[in-house]
Amino acid sequence: MATQPEPSNNLSLSVFDLSAAEKLQLVEDLWDDLAADADAVPIHDWQKAEVARRKANLMSNPASGLRWEDVKARIRQRYGR
């Protein structure tokens, strides 16, 4: 996790005082912590229903899906990465 600067003059720091790089590191650390115990992250019924709907659509129309490589290529083309 990113090292926070020492507070000066007894001022409290918040996450909003972190640099962009430190904020990104914090988000990554939080994500990794959540992913380590995926069962602790609640999945709502509407999310389960959406996954089921998409799976059913893919199963009935396999050509509607995209390969992961194609998805990555589209993202990179759109956002220049």
Image (cartoon, rainbow, N blue to C red):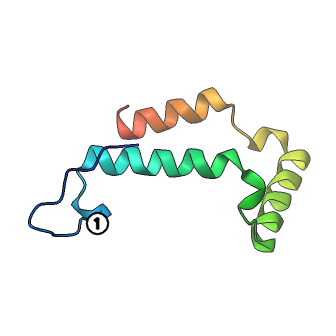
Q: In this rendering, would 71 be left or right of 52?
A: left
**What residue is pinned by disc 1?**
14
Q: Quadrant of residue 17?
A: bottom left
Up-down: is 1 above or below 57?
Answer: above
- Which quadrant is home to the N terminus? top left
Q: In this rendering, would 55 be left or right of 4?
A: right
Question: Identity of the amino acid at label 1?
Answer: Ser
For mark 1, give the secondary structure: loop
- Residue at 37 percent of width and 47 percent of height: 24
- Which quadrant is home to the C terminus? top left
- Residue at 61 percent of width and 26 percent of height: 69
- Residue at 84 percent of width and 53 percent of height: 57
Residue 11: percent from left, percent from top = 16, 70
Which of these two is toward me, 16 or 74? 16
Residue 59: percent from left, percent from top = 90, 46
Total labels drawn: 1
Which of these two is toward me, 69 or 21? 21
